[in-house]
Image: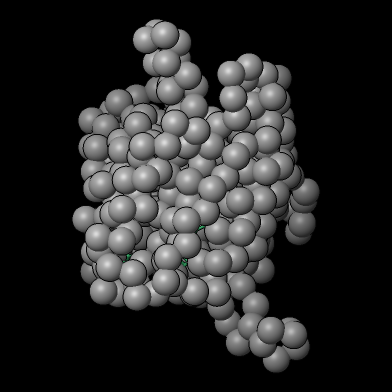
Amino acid sequence: MKRLFVVSIHMGVHILDGKETASAIRAQIASDVAALKERKPGLGVILVGDNPASISYVKGKEKACAEAGMLSRELRLPETATHDDVVAAVESLNAAADIDGILVQLPLPAHLDESAILARIAPDKDVDGLHVQSLGSLLKGEPVFVPCTPYGVAMMLSHNGIDVAGKHVVIVGRSTLVGKSLANLLLLKGAHGDATVTVCHSSTPDLGVHTRQADVLVAAIGRPNTITADMVKPGSVVIDVGVNRVEDATRKRGYRLVGDVDYEAVSAVASAITPVPGGVGPMTITMLLKNTLAAARMHLQKKGQTD
Ligand code: NAP
């Protein structure tokens, strides 16, 4: 039977531990990978430029692949790479028989058109779920690859026994990467879905009027302390997707990471909350592995049918 909250308890609030939840799901993925007889699933990663955060994210993804028994191949291009250079890298991974999924690490340098490049990924390898075909399938209610962060939020909830069916979920943020895709996922009929969803954004007047109605409140804003305790319904579940750097002279690197939620104050009101770091972040990488495994199974099945 599913446990209700794989968590620790702090000040009466359940802390939804992303590391623990992700590690349980990754163990299952690793065991499913080991059971694949034909070959390892493969992830191709394209990294353009030398943005330190992007380099560190790519390293984390490659490490996670190795731990799950998957192959990863990195194609690194200079900051000055042209549209054609990046498309050529995408095409080479599209054609690679041992690569099941392709991830173009975002953001790309400003001179490159992200949408035009993502559109060149073969839809059956779009494990980041950001190709228009993947997004269209999600909107239509027939998802193939769901974008990893929204998928991670949904799995964080369901894995911890929090069923959103019939609940009012309020999402603050309407990006394709997070808010809008999550809204579509939670609106699906059946698994992960059947929620009543409200989406707020920077033009929403009086945010608190909406957030106070939430049974589950998701913050995907990118601004520290935007969700304060008075904006949260007592007993609700709060998922903080935000990752923000705030100056902190006591830390070696001069900053610390915080979410969009005033964590301490909201913890006194909510019934469950995700920390930052250690909440949604580890789930995002885990869903990339899950999508890559699903892509490999699809490719192996197709190959089996044509052999
Ligand atoms: P984004 O594209 O900048 O979108 C932010 C959204 O928040 C927009 O829809 C914006 O509204 C809305 N917003 C901004 N200020 C607001 C305010 N004061 N009140 C209400 N809404 C407001 O960012 P994103 O890519 O969705 O990412 C959001 C956050 O999640 C960032 O901190 C990012 O680092 C983090 N993130 C974390 C992960 C993870 O794995 N943990 C993954 C992806 C993103 P408008 O549309 O009107 O501008």
Q: What is the image's colouring?
A: one colour
As rendered, which of 265 and 117 lies closer to the eye?
A: 117
- Residue in the picture at 24% in, 37% down: 133
Asked if 99 appears above or below 74 in the picture, the reply is above
Q: Quadrant of the C terminus?
A: top left
Of residues 128 and 34, the one drawn nearer to the viewer in this rendering: 34
Q: Quadrant of residue 41?
A: top right
Up-down relation of residue 221 to residue 307 (above or below):
below
Q: As drawn, is 72 to the left or to the right of 83?
A: right
As drawn, the residue found furthest toward the bottom would be: 249
Pinpoint residue 236: horizontal percent, then vertical percent.
54, 49
x and y, in percent, of residue 147 in the image? 40, 44
Count the marks: how many? 0
Is residue 195 or residue 241 the one in the foreground? 241
Above-or-below relation of 228 to 17: below
* Residue at 26% over, 74% down: 111
Q: Residue at (28%, 28%) from the top-left corner? A: 141
> Does the rendering let one see residue 216?
no
Give x and y (percent) for residue 192.
Answer: 45, 31
Q: Quadrant of ligand 1?
A: bottom left
Dividing the image into 4 quarters, which one contains the N terminus? top right
Residue 175's spot in the image, x, y percent?
32, 58
The one of 108 and 10 positioned closer to us in this rendering = 108
Q: Residue 31: in sight, yes or no?
A: yes
Q: Residue at x 40, y 43 (%)?
A: 93
Q: Decide if residue 195 is on the left or right side of residue 38.
A: left
